[in-house]
Image: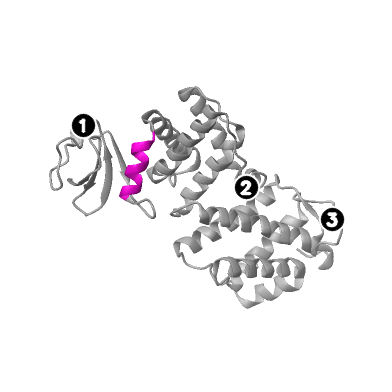
Amino acid sequence: MQVSKVFNNNVVLGVDERGAEHVLMGRGLGFQAHAGDAVDTERVERTFVATGTQTAERIAAFVEEIPLPDIEVTEEIVRAGREALGDHVTEHVLVPLADHISFALRRAEDGSQIEYPLQWEVPYLYPAEVAFSRVALGIIEERRGVRLPDLEAIPLALHFVNAQFGAPDMSTTVRMTEVLTETLAIIRAEYGIEIDEQSLDVARFVTHLRHLFLREQQGGPPSPVTGDDLHDAVRAARPRAYACATRIGALLTERFGWDVTEDERLYLALHVSRLTAGGAAAGSGSPSDYSTAGGTA
C-alpha cells in the first residue's frame, strides 16, 4: 500500500494495489511521509474505509477530532453488534457511530440533552437494534465512565439499522422509519382498530417491509410470480387487506418511486390479514376480513 496523501503526523490516506482508498491511523505514521511512499504498515493501528458520502477527507477530519478512547469503545460496540445483529454490522459503521458517541459524551459533560424524532416508533419497529443499543450504553458507561441517557439508544439503533441497508447517510433509514409508521397508520384507519406494536405479527410485518426496503435499496430481483388465480382468491377472500396493501403500495411508490408489483401487493395483503386477525389487533371496531369472507382462510 502506498501513501496518497498525508493529513497529519498520525493520519494518512493510503491506496492499495486495487486502487481502493483507506484512511490509516497510527502514531507517527505521517511523519516525514510523502505521496508515493510505501506505507509503514508496522505503524498502522487502525484502518477506515471510505464509502458513499464518507470521503477520505471527511473520515480523516472525523478521526482527527474524535478522541482515541471514543474510537476504541466504538470498535468494541461494533464487534459486539456484529455478533448480536449480524455480519451487516461492518467497519463502515465505525466512523459515523464513533462521531455520534463522541458528540453524545460531550453533551453529557455539558449537561445538555436532546430530543430525538421517532423516539416512540423506533423501539417497536426495530426491537433487536434497540435492545443491543441499550447493551452498547452499558459498554460506554463501563469503558468511559459516563452513563448516557436511555434515549440515546434511539439514534444508536438507527445507526445499526442503517448498516443493514448500506445507505450513505441516515436519511434513507429515517424516511423508511417514517413510512413504516405511516403504513401501520393506514391499517389502523382501514380497520378502525388498535394494533399491539409489541406483537409477533407486527414484528413479522415490519420484517417483511424491511426486506422489501433492502431488496429495493440493493436492486434485488422482484418477488416470484404466484399466478393470477391466487391473486384473485386473495382479493375475493381478503378485500380489505388487499385494499390496505394497495394503499401501502401507493405510499411506497409516492415516497420512493418504486414499482410495487402485484405479487408484492399479494404478500402485503396476507401480512395485513394476519396482523388484523391475530393477536396484534385489539378492540376492533369493525369486522375483519375473516368475517367478511365468511370465515374462509
**Which residue matches tag 3?**
284
The image shows residue 88 at horizontal and vertical percentages of: 44, 47
**Which residue matches tag 1?**
28
- Which is more toward the observer, 37 or 87? 37
Q: Say which amino acid is labelled 3.
A: Ser
How dense is the environment of label 3, judged by Cα within 10 Å: few (below 14), some, or many (20 and up)?
some
Counting residues from the start of the chain, the first of labels 2 and 3 encountered is 2
Q: Say which amino acid is labelled 1.
A: Gly
- Which is more toward the observer, 238 or 121? 121
Question: At 52% across and 56% down in the image, what residue appears?
Answer: 172
Element class at badge 1: loop
Boundaries of the magenta span: 56-66
3 in the magenta segment: no
Counting residues from the start of the chain, the first of labels 1 and 2 encountered is 1
Q: CA distance from mark 1 to mark 2?
A: 42 Å
Q: Nearer the viewer, mark 2 or mark 3?
A: 2
**Which residue matches tag 2?**
117
Q: Classify 208 as above or below 128.
A: below
Q: Is residue 42 left or right of residue 254?
A: left
